[in-house]
Image (cartoon, grey):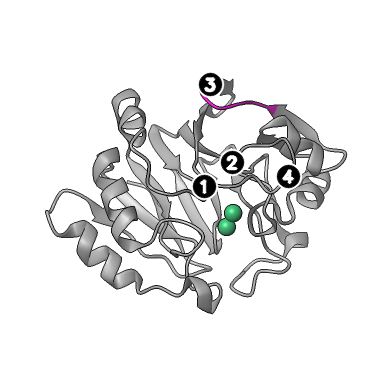
Amino acid sequence: MLKFSYYGHSAFLLDDGSSRLLFDPFLTFNPAATLSADKAEADYILVSHGHQDHLGDAGSIARMSDATVIGVPEIIDACGKVKGHGMNIGGTAKFPFGKVFMTPAMHSAGVPGAIACGFVVTIGGKTVYYSGDTSLFSDMALISRKFRIDYAVLPIGDNYTMGIEDAAIAAEILQAEHVIPVHYNTWPVVQQDAELFKMRVEMDGFIKCHILKPGEAMELE
Ligand code: NI
Ligand code: MN
């Protein structure tokens, strides 16, 4: 059993019942956040890049929960004094819950010397790809060659990342069974109609789209 909880913007939690993986915990200054940073609990915190809307409260939550931060070394350094597991693009690491593969992302890093990334996480019998902030890029085809992706968590907000059309193409290239849109409606500049994305993605009948409001959770089937 694997539970996905959405906290707004690109902050979400994967929980297999024994490990809690918190992704891009931007909570304190997130107008859409449904969880306050001092209530967040995690065993691992995965940070895709150093922009504040992703790095967010990673450092303070890691210290409070004694969680391990997973990211490129420069991002772990940016968290201050924390337990870290440094990785880089193309590498896989094993953890008690499963595996993490670090993917490229086409985006600026937010921290000097760092690079933006995404993650393919194998946990609870599922393979979940979180692209982080990125444009559409053709090497997503290599990710789908390496993994059978059950769930793809993709930004649809446009302006800083893929918009609806490119994220729909990404879902197709990834051959994801399910897709969950994130990184939209936090501010006017990333305003999007997620229902439009759902319609576009489900058009051919292969991919199922799940729209979660901040604060909502679902079981990943
Ligand atoms: Ni960013
Ligand atoms: Mn962002």
Q: Position of residue 121 (x, y in %)?
A: 48, 34
Q: Which residue type carries mark 4?
A: Val
**Do labels 3 and 1 touch, CB within 8 Å?**
no
Q: Quadrant of ligand 2?
A: bottom right
State how far apart marks 2 and 1 are (Cα). 8 Å
What secondary structure is found at the residue carrying circle 1? loop
Q: Nearer the viewer, mark 4 or mark 3?
A: 4
Residue located 81% across and 37% down the image: 77
**Do labels 2 and 1 touch, CB within 8 Å?**
yes
What secondary structure is found at the residue carrying circle 3? strand
Residue bearing the label numbered 2: 116
Crowdedness of circle 1 by 10 Å Cα count: few (<14), some, many (20+)? many
**Do labels 2 and 3 touch, CB within 8 Å?**
no
Residue bearing the label numbered 4: 111
State how far apart marks 1 and 4 are (Cα). 15 Å
The numbered mark at residue 132 is: 1
Q: Nearer the viewer, mark 2 or mark 1?
A: 2
Q: Nearer the viewer, mark 3 or mark 1?
A: 1
Mark positioned earlier in the residue sequence (3 or 1): 3
Q: Which residue type carries mark 2?
A: Ala
Q: Is residue 113 left or right of residue 10?
A: right
Residue bearing the label numbered 3: 92
**Do labels 4 and 3 touch, CB within 8 Å?**
no
Crowdedness of circle 2 by 10 Å Cα count: few (<14), some, many (20+)? many
